[in-house]
Image: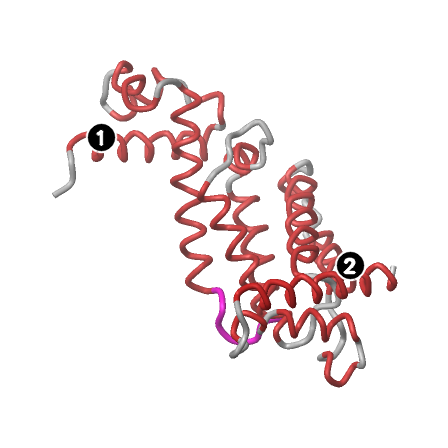
Amino acid sequence: MVDTKDKTRGHLIEVAARLLRTEGPAAVTTRAVAHAAGAQAPTIYRLFGDKDGLLDAVAEHVFATYVAEKALTAGHGDPIADLRAGWDAHLDFGLANPALFALLIDPRRPSSSTVAAGLEVLRTRVRRVAAIGRLRVPESRAVELIHAIGTGAVLTLLSQPAQSRDLGLADALYDTLTRAILTDTPALTDDSTTASAVAFRTVVPELPGLTATERLLMSEWLERASEAGAAAQT
């Protein structure tokens, strides 16, 4: 049975999310949300502390739903296609939720378990690419590049008028990104020592007959080798 307090909190978040999506952050005042939800303003202060607390709750709720859906589609089929699907989903979410996207990337915002979960989905996609020998840089570098370029792509597109947005820019950025992080063919047929090191590192946790310390050391050696190889290619 749903607690009355939780039900009220959920209703207020949904109303605030709708206002944020349709009218922007300025419309999400405690008075406006309370009025639209048929509640009293003190209820918002009691449940969320203030307007900023309400906005944080909205961001977590909407993004958590997006991350859950993204996690369901990750890890199936071709890892390269899966990586592209994640990129497209990221762009679609950012363009559909500009105000919320701005909240999520605000560096002043406290660390979020939901944002961390979203990054973990990205790491999973990248690890699958590494496992088939198609990654030319360390996994951590690939994740950072995808995250940085993806965020920049959304912000750039949002700065353009919606009716004349250059969506081809996002495709061009993705092409540039893939040239930086992917090999053309799997490492075993490409003679790429960096890609081989990155690929082998993905299976280290599953190797039998090794202690936890030995697995850690091997993973660190392969990480250093892949970083050195990536640096030599630049």
State the SS at label 1: helix
Q: Is residue 170 left or right of residue 65?
A: right
* N-term-proximal mark, 1 vs 2: 1
Q: Quadrant of the N terminus?
A: top left
The span shown in magenta is 74-80
Closer to us: 16 or 104: 104
Tell me, yes or no, if residue 164 can be seen here: no
Q: Say above or below: 113 vs 40.
A: below
Q: Residue furthest bottom?
A: 189
The numbered disc on residue 176 is 2
The numbered disc on residue 8 is 1
Separation of residues labelled 1 and 2 (CA atoms): 47 Å
Q: Is residue 67 left or right of residue 198?
A: left
Q: Tell me the residue at 34%/23% (across/down).
A: 48
Q: Tell me the residue at 65%/74% (across/down).
A: 200
State the SS at label 2: helix
The rendered magenta stretch, by its main secondary structure, is classed as loop
In magenta stretch: residue 98: no
